[in-house]
Image (spheres, helix red, strand yellow):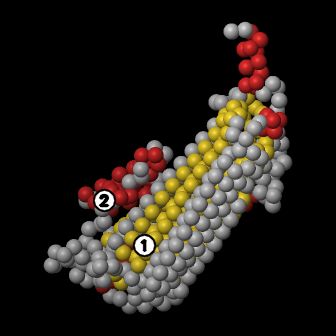
């Protein structure tokens, strides 16, 4: 083969010394551009249908002003790149990748040293998966952007992404009919921050070690199934907050070791079933303006306080089809052997009363004195606590097998959280309370 021909092929492959933006400008719709190993400097605008594939070690380093990559054409694919060094203007939504188009694929990229990771701006029917996103750790949380921000963007698929050290993991605004699955979010403010977005599905995601796991607000018809909300602690923190929502399905989730497990305000007509709510300071904190919810067939395990009500009553249904919830603190009996307790479970704790009047009482929640006081209150009820009760408490916890992560998500579960799942499984075989307490003290 002539040397001249080989040289021509090499020059064509490398773009004849052209910058990456020049190669995009000269390409025809449908072309594939391969980005060679090394650092390619300058912002990139893709305004035609192209596939941009990075060789191992290919870096696109932005100008430090604006977004590093802007996708302005439908049906673009970006894969295998390291994307870094966007601008610093939150008002302009400076991003690693700004997606302003539909039917695109963004996969297997490392997006780092950016303000926003991927910003969806009126971008529909895209698939974004297998990306790793890290914001600027040197900035305060409020000065960063979100790992992924969706604005007025619908019918997207977002899965198998890892987001760390952003402001929020996912910020979802006016965006509907999107599937979020097998993502992992940690070390952010809100793992999921969710506003005015109906009919989305969250399946098998992990939100851990954040200030708060999720805040779901002003939205209807959301399905939250088989997710993990673990170790989310901070000022006014919670596993999941629901505000002004309706018609939610929250099923088969782990909500463990949070300041408050579930928080309800103006949230109605929703179903919460088959969840494990364990090791939280408060399992449920609920405003009286949240009527018509069903909370049944859940496992409430070793929460310091099962329920705090802001108001008098919640009108919550604590059982469905004759089955209530499993409460590790329930000390009733089942004489007829039907699997449910013969006496109601009073869903309250003396510390619901004391905390509202003396917040420092929380310091003593683990003490033997607190347990003695709770037992005395049950035997000699002299304080006016809430009137909530589960009339059909379960004698055995629900099966945990449905909460196991699928293989693609399980590979990223940390060692401590893997131990947590094993201990919870051990709870069903007996002796679980002691094991769970020991694990919780050592996390």
Kindly check if marks 2 and 1 are in contact, taking CB atoms under 8 A apart as contact.
no
Task: Determine the residue positioned at 73% across, 55% down.
Answer: 100
Image side of residue 178 versus residue 404, left or right: right
Secondary structure found at label 1: strand
Q: Nearer the viewer, mark 2 or mark 1?
A: 1
Residue 435 visible in this rendered orientation of the protein: no
Q: Residue at x 41, y 50 (%)?
A: 406
In three-dimensional space, the C-alpha distance between marks 2 and 1, rounded to whole angstroms, equals 21 Å
Of 222 and 317, the residue lying toward us = 222
Q: Earlier in the sequence, mark 2 or mark 1?
A: 1
Q: Is residue 341 left or right of residue 115?
A: left
Question: Which residue is disc 1 drawn over?
Answer: 272
- Quadrant in which the N terminus is drawn: top right
Q: Quadrant of residue 57?
A: top right
Task: Name the residue that disc number 2 marks.
Answer: 427
Residue 89 in picture, x, y percent from top left: 82, 55
378 relative position to 160: left or right: left
Q: Is residue 420 visible?
A: yes
Picture residue at 30% right of the left edge, 59% below the top: 427
The percent position of residue 294, horizontal first and vertical second, equals 41, 79
Relative to 392, 56 lies left or right: right
Alpha-carbon neighbours of circle 2 within 10 Å: few (<14), some, or many (≥20)?
some
Asked if 160 appears above or below 230 in the picture, the reply is above
Q: Label 2's element? A: helix
Quarter location, residue 143: bottom right
Looking at the picture, how far across and down is residue 215, in whole percent? 59, 68
392 lies above or below 443: below
Q: Nearer the viewer, residue 262 or 198?
A: 198
């Amino acid at each position: 083969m002539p040397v001249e021909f080989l040289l021509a092929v090499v020059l064509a492959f490398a773009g004849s010394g052209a910058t990456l933006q020049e190669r995009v400008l000269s390409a025809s719709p449908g072309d594939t551009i391969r980005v060679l190993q090394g650092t390619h400097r300058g912002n990139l605008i893709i305004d035609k249908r192209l596939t941009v594939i990075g060789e191992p070690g290919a870096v696109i380093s932005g100008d430090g002003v604006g977004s590093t990559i802007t996708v302005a054409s439908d049906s673009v694919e970006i894969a295998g790149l390291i994307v870094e060094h966007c601008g610093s203007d939150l008002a302009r939504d400076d991003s690693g990748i700004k997606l302003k188009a539909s039917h695109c694929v963004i996969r297997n990229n490392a997006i780092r040293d950016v303000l926003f990771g991927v910003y969806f701006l009126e971008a529909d029917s895209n698939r974004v998966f297998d990306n790793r996103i890290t914001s600027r750790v040197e900035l305060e949380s409020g000065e960063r952007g979100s790992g992924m921000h969706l604005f007025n963007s619908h019918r997207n698929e977002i899965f198998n992404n890892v987001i760390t050290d952003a402001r929020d993991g996912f910020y979802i605004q006016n965006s509907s009919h999107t599937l979020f699955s097998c993502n992992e979010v940690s070390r952010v403010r809100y793992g999921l921050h969710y506003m005015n977005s109906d009919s989305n599905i969250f399946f098998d995601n992990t939100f851990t070690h954040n200030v708060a796991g999720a805040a779901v607000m002003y939205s209807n018809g959301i399905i939250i199934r088989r997710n993990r909300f673990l170790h989310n602690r901070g000022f006014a923190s919670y596993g999941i907050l629901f505000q002004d929502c309706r018609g939610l399905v929250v099923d088969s989730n782990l909500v463990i070791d949070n300041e408050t497990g579930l928080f309800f305000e103006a949230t109605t007509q929703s179903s919460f079933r088959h969840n494990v709510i364990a090791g939280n300071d408060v399992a449920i904190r609920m405003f009286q303006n949240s009527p018509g919810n069903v909370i049944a067939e859940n496992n409430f395990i070793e929460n310091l306080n099962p329920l705090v009500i802001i108001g008098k009553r919640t009108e919550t249904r604590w059982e469905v089809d004759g089955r209530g919830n499993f409460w590790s603190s329930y000390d009733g009996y089942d004489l007829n052997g039907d699997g449910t307790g013969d006496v109601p479970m009073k869903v309250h704790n003396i510390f619901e009363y004391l905390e509202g009047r003396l917040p420092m009482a929380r310091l003593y929640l683990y003490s033997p004195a607190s347990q003695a006081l709770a037992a005395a209150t049950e035997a000699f009820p002299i304080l006016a606590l809430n009137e909530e009760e589960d009339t059909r408490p379960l004698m055995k916890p629900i099966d945990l097998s449905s909460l196991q992560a699928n293989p693609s998500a399980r590979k990223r579960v940390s060692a401590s959280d893997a131990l947590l799942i094993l201990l919870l499984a051990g709870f069903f075989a007996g002796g679980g309370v002691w094991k769970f307490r020991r694990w919780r003290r050592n996390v």
